[in-house]
């Protein structure tokens, strides 16, 4: 009986980890951190490459990432509907 209880507790702990990972994957905190790090890396690249207006031009790919991630739930819903027909 003790072994079954341990297995149940192990499954519950795994479910908590999976739920936390899923929440992180869907969080705006993660999206903003990725967009910010993308912006910083692109600014650095453009600055050292001598390209014009790195602080302004680096906004485009970072904003594109945020827009694409915001649209993904809609595409996922559409894809699931098409798949389940």
Image: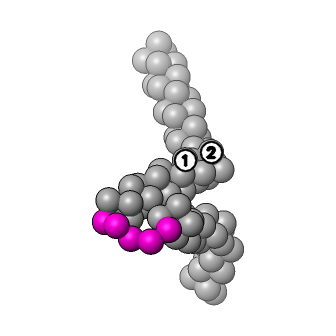
Q: Residue furthest left?
A: 49
Front residue of this view, candidates 85 and 74: 74
Front residue of this view, candidates 35 and 24: 35
Q: Is residue 37 visible?
A: yes
Counting the numbered discs, the total is 2
Circles 1 and 2 in contact, beta carbons < 8 Å: yes
Q: Is residue 30 above or below residue 76?
A: above
Tell me the distance, in whole angstroms, between the alpha carbons under discs 1 and 2.
6 Å
Majority SS type along the magenta span: loop
Mark 2 Cα-neighbour bin, 10 Å: few <14, some 14–19, many ≥20: few
Q: Residue furthest top?
A: 2
Mark 1 Cα-neighbour bin, 10 Å: few <14, some 14–19, many ≥20: few
Q: Which residue is mark 1?
A: 33
Q: Which residues are magenta?
A: 49-53
Q: What residue do we see at 55% from left, 47% from top?
A: 33
State the image quarter where residue 72 is shown.
bottom right
Element under disc 2: helix
Quadrant containing the C terminus in the rendered view: bottom right
State the image quarter where residue 47 is shown.
bottom left
Q: Which residue is mark 2?
A: 29
Q: Is residue 16 above or below residue 67?
A: above
Q: What residue do we see at 66% from left, 80% from top?
A: 78
Residue 13 at x, y percent in the picture: 52, 27
Q: Is residue 45 above or below residue 9?
A: below
């Amino acid at each position: 009986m003790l072994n079954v209880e341990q297995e149940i507790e192990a499954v519950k702990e795994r479910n908590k980890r999976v739920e936390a990972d899923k929440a992180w994957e869907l969080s705006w905190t993660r999206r903003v951190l990725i967009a910010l790090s993308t912006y910083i890396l692109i600014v650095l690249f453009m600055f050292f490459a001598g390209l014009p207006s790195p602080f302004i031009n680096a906004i485009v790919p970072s904003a594109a990432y945020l827009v694409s991630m915001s649209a993904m739930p809609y595409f996922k819903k559409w894809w699931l509907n098409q798949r389940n027909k």
